[in-house]
Amino acid sequence: MSDGRAPARPARRAWPVAAILLAAALFALADWFTRPPPLPGYAQVRAAWRPSEAWLYDRNGVLLDSSRVDFATRRLAWTPLDRIAPIARTTIVTAEDRRFADHAGVDWLALGGALRDRITGKRPRGASTLAMQLAGFLAPDLARPGARGWRDKLRQIRAARTIGETWSRDQILEAYLNLAGFRGEAQGIGAAALGLFGKTPAALTRDDALLLAALLPNPQAPANRVARRACALARDKNCARYSALAASMLGPARSLALDPGLAPHLADRLLQKPGMRVATTLDINVQRIAIAALRRQLLGLGATRARDGAVIVVDNASGDVLAYVGGIGGNSTAPAVDAANAYRQAGSTLKPFLYAEAIEKGYLTPASILDDSPVQLDTASGLYVPQNYDRAFKGPVSARAALAGSLNVPAVRTLLLVGVEPFRDRLWDTGYRGLVEDGAYYGFSLALGSAEVTLAEQAAAYRSLARGGRWSPLRLTAADPHQPARAITTPAAAWIVGDMLSDPVARAGTFGLDSALRLPFWAAVKTGTSKAMRDNWCVGFSDRFTVAVWVGNVEGDAMRAVSGTSGAAPVWRDVMLALNGARAGHAPPPPPPAGIEARQVTFAGTREQPRREWFLAGTSFARADAAPAEARRPRIATPVSGSVYALDPDIPRDRQRLSVAVTGAAAAHRLRLDARDLGAADTIAPIFPAPGKHQLALVDLAGRIVDRVTFTVR
């Protein structure tokens, strides 16, 4: 017989199974709920590291400068453990995870102590190990150091155990020191050592390490709190020094750049991506020479005369830029502007290319006589009256003296021979890419440098003269290709112009015999000053180097009491002497190329002495004569036809007379204004024509009109 209890036995046996299943489910749920995200390995972390900086090196691999490219976080290059001072490693490990070498990522003793403190109401101690903090750095959704959520803490613990089991101790410590945030935007011990102490991690001292360790729990803590924690970590009896050290560390005077800072403008131009390492053609020694020369000159001039400058040095043979100084800061009001790559008015620095074209085409020789006398040219935009720098005129001068002495009127007369459009095209071919308009836009002022150019374009153009008229782009980086040179000017014309620019006697009439342009070895050089004294140039070359210098104010205001030889020329001279110092006296002029002949020339009607002169083959002569006044066709020089004169009612009438000038053999000629005879052409006094349109005629004894101009008085 059955007692009715047998069916209950299967139910009792099912309870343990259900409990096991429930426990398994809960465990699986807990495992899923506290599972950390996948973490990268050490190799992945290091490969993915991107510094916020990029670096610029010279031709020999020496660091020139760096540039901040990523402004989200300040990170330098990854710092290997062996490049961190041992005292810094030991101090930080002791402060953050003193049993680091004895656990596998989680310090259970420290966790137990922290739990006990929480239960008993004591102030909780820190229990996060380096591996736990590293897990927080690697996985953004994990708890960061200092988080209190139990689920986040469990996930962090599990992630730390994974790191402890798969990473070596050195890898954990190295990654931690590179990923930890120390202060503000500084991430990693490299940025912290640089920004807070101006040192590399390898140069950190014990006090530095204590202060860094004191920052880790609270990177934004004030100086007094950092000092107290550093003192506690040091276990020193006398902690007075830590207050001063912490205040200095967190003060505003710390430098954020450990690099030499020798080419900031070029660094900003070339360094575009984080982590870039660009090898340039620069030579750090030449760069220092250029910087020192420019700084010395600008300090001597003073901020009230000129605040800015730039220097470029080029190796003639290779086209490598050996020095690139875009500015030196100092008194500059715009120190970030790269003056070496900024477009400025060229002044007289374009004249060598004008004379080279005129000589090449056979329009001039160095001994040809040009008239340096007042001239007025009627242009579409009005009357153009070129003046020399000193507002004086030299009369008849040779082309050699006109170019070397930088005379303006002879240059304009030369441009009339060459033509504005052909000269503009020649400049474009010579690398002056700022001349984007046609010749008519620039007009006759192009001879005097009204176009805008950069210092880099100047260096490349003058280098072409040093290389026999062959132009090629300059090289700034080791990756820039060596492009084949283009023949722009003939070798003979380029050589003759170089000889003219190297002649100290030819330039003596303007600059004197002992100016900054004269060197103890052969060098060709040209200065230039732009309109209203805004720009001062000095560009020249020796047999090996081309040096281009600009001095001025980048904001465009005029300089005060700065001339061609007192502004840029002293910098040019100092750089040239430093580059060629050991070769001074041993750098002969370049030999003349084929197609050139020398001949002794005497000059009549000028103040120039007989000399040996160079000519293109077949164009030489033994005597150069200035045309006498009686040999010139009589013509009216002033007023220029088409001129418009306005009367001012506030100026007395007798002070508003019009000057009339006649040139050439006009002794037997008379002037006639409309129908009224004014008298002999060579004795005419200033006139006062009535308002309206007038015709001024020059007539000979027979009554024939030999010249005529029209002008208007309003």
Image (tube, rainbow, N blue to C red):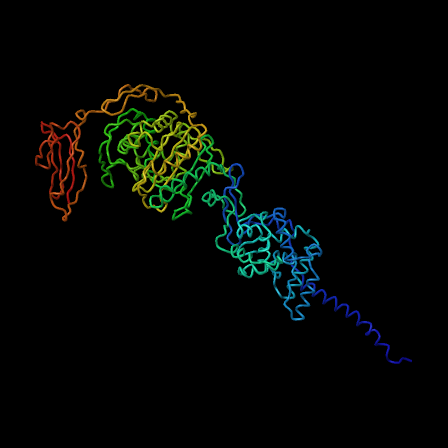
Determine which quarter of the picture holds residue 616: top left
Residue ranking furthest to the right: 1
Report x, y in % for residue 418.
30, 30
Report x, y in % for residue 597.
35, 19
Determine which quarter of the picture holds residue 136: bottom right
Above or below residue 157? Residue 627 is above
Could you tell me which residue is drawn at 17 percent across and 37 percent down?
Answer: 639
Residue ranking furthest to the front: 238
Above or below residue 317? Residue 185 is below
Report x, y in % for residue 670.
10, 31
Above or below residue 297? Residue 668 is above
Could you tell me which residue is drawn at 67 percent across and 70 percent down?
Answer: 119
From the viewer's perspective, tell me whether residue 175 is left or right of residue 438.
right
Report x, y in % for residue 529.
32, 38
Towards the viewer: 509 or 655: 509
- Number of labels in the image equals 0
Could you tell me which residue is drawn at 28 percent across and 25 percent down?
Answer: 368
From the viewer's perspective, tell me whether residue 169 is left or right of residue 709.
right
Towards the viewer: 293 or 372: 293
Q: Quadrant of the N terminus?
A: bottom right
